[in-house]
Image (tube, rainbow, N blue to C red):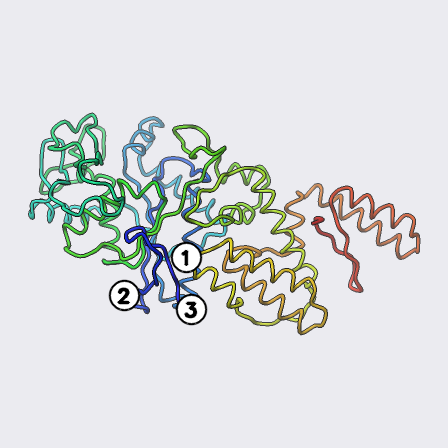
Amino acid sequence: MQIQLTNTLTRRKEPFLPTDPARVTMYVCGPTVYGNAHIGNARPPVVFDTLFRLLRHVYGESAVIYARNYTDIEDKIIAAALRDGVSIDAITRKYERIYEEDMGALGVLPPTLTPRATENIPAMIAIIQKLIDNGAAYVVPTGVYFSVGADNDYGKLSGRAQDELQAGARVEGEDDKRHPSDFALWKASKPGEPTWDAPFGAGRPGWHIECSAMIEEELGSPIDIHGGGIDLIFPHHENEIAQSESAHNHPLARVWMHNGFLTMDKEKMSKSVGNIITPRELLDQGWQGETIRYALLSAHYKAPLDWSDDLLRQAQASLDRIYGALLRLKDAPAAKADAPEPFVAALADDLNTPAAIAELSALVTAANVAKKAPEQAKAKAELQAAAHFLGIAQDDPQHWFRATFGEVAAAQIDALVAQRVEARAAKDFATSDRLRDELAAKGVEVMDSAAGSTWRRKG
């Protein structure tokens, strides 16, 4: 299966050809752990988790090395620690744990590697020293800065001309950098801040150098795929390219991939704007993790996605249809099957999840019309295999419907279904019909079979 991916660097969709098919490397910028991630922050891990699953299918599970970092030293983290009167570790470990719980609820597989910035400071210092030695960086009292003017290729990822760039426009405490677009590699130590010794002066790393160093230390470069949100193209990924290529004289990554913004009422979701909702809040409201994940995958990863309760309701209805088909086939013989080729081909075509979802819908239809045991076994196995690619339909179907109704309502439904079973056994068809109508009014469909009665949400 040939995978095609859109490369932000070349601005075209092209065949994905890893340097070594036995060692496929991918790095995705992870969270800055100073607070709860909002749902917009969850789009990259869900998107690239789906790509991770596809890569492992094509190249083998052991062949794919996926790193997603934690930025655990940064201005906002320091401010949060000072505000709460606790150590920086207390802040970062707390929000790492919450992030992992939230992403786990969304069906995100653990990456192969989860490096922390603070565990890779020596690698950062080594790169910075190389840049100083070759004239691409300079030391001043406030720290060490990358000289954007020394890099003739600067701007090639974002497509911005050098005379338009203000990558690190002057901010308080950076008055001695030589050009407004130069950016900090190392920030000189300040009272009350964590600090590390370095040949060019004690201090702490700038944000951009962290990812360059973690990639080099954990994966080596060039890596096959570097991913993240579209907001990271400039300046973060542009600066990663500049400092890494100036230090090592070879590309940092061969393919750059960026997912589109998540908006709310057509406005970019942002903590500074305040138009955010977190996965934790959505889960507490009763939405299932798979519903949230399905909603995030409902648009192509490159396209913007407007978040709303309507989007979640549509996602839940689609999942109800999938689980309804699996519930119908719960007694079908067990069988093994790969996801059908048209489904995998849709994902291989630049991770086209809307097209893959359309193929998945066709598999649901096939499962619903299958009559004979061999057909049912095949339809069920293919549907489950395809759903696994998208990280959905991993629950027991009966539990899924109970969970989406809530346990109190589910227990009430159980009682009505049990009463209806008793009425049918007593041939009290008037009561049976009344109870069926009462359940239908609650949005419940009862399915009778020789093995008993089960129920699901009405489609």
| Amino acid type at mark 1 | Asp
| Amino acid type at mark 3 | Met
Disc 3 designates what residue? 1
Q: Are marks 1 and 2 in contact (CB under 8 Å)?
A: no
Percent from the top left, x then y, of residue 436?
82, 48
Q: Are marks 2 and 3 in contact (CB under 8 Å)?
A: no
Residue at disc 1, secondary structure: loop
Percent from the top left, x then y, of residue 124?
19, 47
CA distance for labels 1 and 3: 12 Å
- Up-down relation of residue 13 to residue 153 (above or below): below
| Crowding at mark 2 (Cα within 10 Å: few <14, some 14-19, many 20+) | few
* Quadrant of the rendered image containing residue 272: top left
- Up-down relation of residue 202 to residue 61 (above or below): above
Camera-near label (2 vs 3) is: 3
| Crowding at mark 1 (Cα within 10 Å: few <14, some 14-19, many 20+) | many
| Crowding at mark 3 (Cα within 10 Å: few <14, some 14-19, many 20+) | few
Q: Are marks 1 and 3 in contact (CB under 8 Å)?
A: no
Residue at disc 3, secondary structure: loop
Q: Tell me the tag on residue 15.
A: none
Please give the name of the residue rendered at 73% of the width and 44% of the height, measured from the top-left corner.
Answer: 443
Disc 2 designates what residue? 19
Mark earlier in primary sequence (1, 2): 2
* Quadrant of the rendered image containing residue 20: bottom left
Relative side of 320 to 256, left or right? right
CA distance for labels 1 and 2: 19 Å
